[in-house]
Image (cartoon, rainbow, N blue to C red):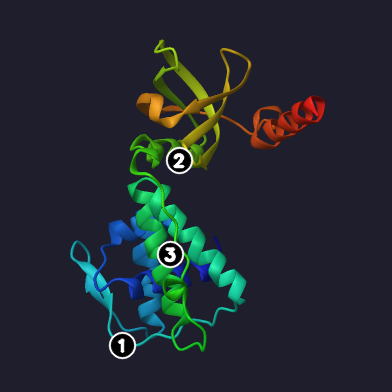
Amino acid sequence: MRRADRLLDLVARLKARPLVRADDLAGAMDVSVRTVYRDLAALQAQGLPIEGQAGVGYMLRGAIDLPPLTFTHDQLEALALGLAYVEQVGDTALADAARDARAKVDAAWAGQPTAAPSNRRLRARQRPQHRAPACAEAVRSALRQRRLIAFSYRDAKQRLTFRRVRPVALTAYFDGWMLIAWCPQRGDFRHFRLDRMMDVSATKTSFPDEPDHDLGAYLRRHAMISAGAG
């Protein structure tokens, strides 16, 4: 992310909450705490009314105008529905991120003649048992950090196995969440239902870019299989 975009993101996050700690900002923005302190100092030097101190939190004193956003009605409704869906199906951290994202867009949209995402009459609903389990957050982190994950897996026949795979992508669908992964042991792509995964942990082993094992390769193979079946 460009520094200018990061500063705008930081301002929006400060507007979304009355008080927020630097540690929480760093985690949400995927940067170091030192970077947050440096960016806060830069914004204060530009005259923005940011108050607070390390270990306590930071807040905005006064109004801040963010650059205007330009969205069509359909784009705003897509945002509203997408964020509502994430709140329903995501793990705790992802659902919180969806709420924060909506607050950021709402804050930037204030004063516009059309309704902000929070006021769009579009909703989403998922059965509680089909929402992302707690392990989804660990899997998402491994995807970002490009690390192998290890877990125990109980299949449809109740057989328990231990797996160590390269995460490729996560899919949310009506019946829950599915992990697409490359299995070095099998030498092929495999699917795993998150609700059957146990003791999930990201290993210290990272993996490089390999076109034959990424999402593009999986989708190409899937398309070839579908074409053959047709």
Residue topped by disc 3 = 101
Coordinates of residue 74 in the picture (x, y in percent): 61, 71
Q: Quick check: can you spot residue 34? A: yes
Residue 32 visible in the shown view: no
The image shows residue 80 at horizontal and vertical percentages of 49, 66
**In whole angstroms, how far apart are the C-alphas of marks 2 and 1?**
36 Å
Q: Residues within 10 Å of mark 3 (few under 14, many from 20)?
A: some
Q: Amino acid at mark 3?
A: Ala
Q: Is residue 78 left or right of residue 202?
A: right
Q: Residue at x 52, y 69 (%)?
A: 5
In this picture, is 187 found above or below 135? above
To which quarter of the image does residue 25 belong? bottom left
Q: Amino acid at mark 1?
A: Gly
Nearest the eye: 13 or 93:
93
Q: Which labelled disc corresponds to residue 62?
A: 1
Tag nearer the camera, 2 or 1: 2
Q: Give the structural element (helix, strand or loop) at label 3.
A: helix
Question: Counting residues from the N terminus, which is met first, the one under dot 2 or under dot 3?
Answer: 3
| Residue drawn at x 47%, y 19% as measured from the top left | 164
Q: CA distance from mark 2 to mark 3?
A: 18 Å
